[in-house]
Amino acid sequence: MNENNFFIINTVPLWAEGVQDGNILIGDEGITLNKSSDYTYEDTIIPPSVEPVSLDRDACGVLYILDRNKKNVLLFDIKNKYSRWMTHIPFENPVSIAIDEFDLYIVDAVGTGEWKLYCAARVNGQMRREMEIPLEVRIASCGDGLLYVLDVNNQKVFKTGWQWDLQEVVTDLEGAADIASDRDANIYILQPEKRDILMFAKDGNFKQSLSIPFEPGAKFLNLAVESSDHIFLGFAKESSTGWGILQLTKRLKYAISGTYTGKVFDSTQTGCRWSKLILDADIPANTRVTLSYAASDDEPGPAGPYARAPIVNPTDALLRDAVGRYIRFKIELYGDENGWAAPLIRSLKIFFPMVTYLRYLPEIYQENEESSEFLERFLLLFETFLAQKEGQAFQFTQYMDPGAAPNEFIHWLSSWLAIAYDENWPMDKKRQLIRWAPELYKKRGTPWTLSRLMEFFSGIKPVIIEPFHLKCIDKNNEEYKELVGKLYGSGSYRFTVLVPPNWEDPGAPVKKAKQVTEAERGVMQRIIDTEKPAHTVGCLQVLEPWFNLDRHTYLEINTVLTKPQFILEKTSVLARDTAIYEKEPGGRVGEKSRADIDSILT
């Protein structure tokens, strides 16, 4: 073990000492190909009987479609295929729509060179306010009652409030036809002629360009973005009156290839024979890793020259003809052609000098240079396997540590300490139980140990009722004696373990208990049977979260007395003609007056 030295690269600072092109990503796990986001076709949506001029989408998945013919807004639920018309505002020629949490904004061309901006309540479509605007614009909401405004003629993007105080955000656009924004207020600009979408941060800095997937004969008209993961494009067929909405979904794609050139390793030995390398890597199907190396007594540059043909997918490879004081590696990573997968290299380990099992054989096997070279490489196959076992034996102390031992060794380590646990236990609890074993064994068979293990498994401290706890009961009161026998049984060697409910939200006014499965009940009963004294009988009672007299009912444990509350389906019901509506204030004439709901305008 001491005859071999090695260099290793396995941390971010060590990987960063090398040189990589722009397609290599260095992270905590190692090096892989860089990632970028791309949008792919997912679905074509065709709502009924509308021709979309503009569209937007809310966080609940509902599309707001501005219709050219009916001059109205259609709400279309993509998932449930439900639609309804929303408002009856007398638009003349609506051109753009945007929505925020409470409001609906619509730009209307009311004449030659004249436009209006309307604001209506999303809850019922009532008009809130309107104003004349001096520009032909397309709009998108950026939250807090503010709008992004695309000036179609001057190809600029502004941010504004209702006071129309324009603040320039993006300039020098070309061919921009529509604008949208996501939940993070990023800006998306549709350029239909170039068939792409430009993405800007909310401060106007350019982030990326997104290609529109091919749709035969389609002319893209408008754009909506629910979040950065979903984009919706309204399109019309150039050869017909057909139209639809294209749904695109973001997917992460890896670069096709990338090159990493490591730093120079110095063995400090002139003419050093480098032995082998071990690459800890994940190489998915249709991907590959190639590795080249340059070794010499003069420090090699990044360009090499690199000896021999590259090694393909090396995990444990012999370095042939690698002679010299210095060595440098070049690693090339190739992802699959679609960009959905890429190799990941966690560490690179290089051994030197060349020391093999050949030195243990008689000199006659080392005299012939040609045959000894073959024999040396042949023996390295066995050395690779045996060296791994020697390393495990050398590091055997880690197997004695429950925090460091491999998962597959935990069961064996538990058997050494005679620890019996259920296979359903999580691995972290198994490791903790091994740590506690010496302390628990000192007090085995006591309520303290039983309580500690039950709390460790269930997450809540149990209540253990032993016979001496019941001595306060009046022995002459037959009713009490009967009740105690029903609850805790009879006998001097019988005890009961009460497991209180485990509340999902202990601070909530109405508590809801987590359900205890039959498997969990079985584990808790086995804990009791294992840890109880041999001459006793242990009974398990998982307390139900309800008030039931003559049963296991304990105030502040599984029963809480509260004042009467209005709880649907529990203490109260709604009458047949009851209506529930949002408290968000729509357009109002008086207090809580809503047209077509509780007020009629004539």
Image (tube, rainbow, N blue to C red):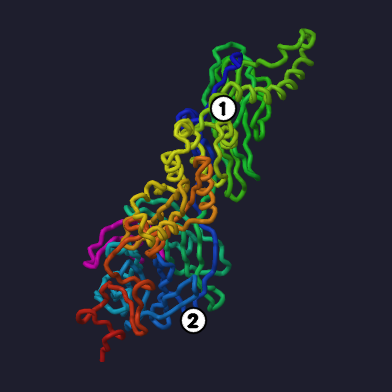
Q: Which quadrant of the view contains residue 480? A: bottom left
Q: Which residues are magenta?
A: 151-178
Residue at 21%, 82% (x, y): give it. Answer: 589
Q: Is residue 28 magenta?
A: no
SS category of the residue bearing label 2 = loop
Q: Position of residue 400 (x, y in %)?
A: 54, 27
Tell which circle, 1 or 2, labels the residue nearer the N-terminal end: 2
Q: Is residue 158 magenta?
A: yes
Q: For mark 2, what is the residue?
A: 49
For label 1, count other residues whose C-alpha is less than 10 Å away and answer few (under 14), some (14-19) or many (20+). Answer: few
Q: For mark 1, what is the residue?
A: 303
* Residue situated in front as seen by the camera: 106 or 59: 59
Q: Position of residue 195 (x, y in %)?
A: 50, 61
Q: Position of residue 566 (x, y in %)?
A: 31, 72
Work out which residue is located at the far left of the displayed protein and give it. Answer: 590
Work out which residue is located at the far bottom of the displayed protein and give it. Answer: 602
Q: Amino acid at mark 1?
A: Ala
Q: Which quadrant of the view contains residue 307? A: top right
Tell me if residue 153 can be seen: no
Q: Compute the Cα span from label 1 to label 2.
A: 64 Å
Residue 245, placed above or below residue 276: below
* Residue situated in front as seen by the camera: 90 or 101: 101
Q: Nearer the viewer, mark 1 or mark 2?
A: 2
Tell me if residue 497 can be seen: yes
Q: Amino acid at mark 2?
A: Ser
Residue 597, placed above or below residue 541: below
* Residue situated in front as seen by the camera: 32 or 53: 32
Q: Which quadrant of the view contains residue 283? A: top right
Quadrant housing the C terminus: bottom left
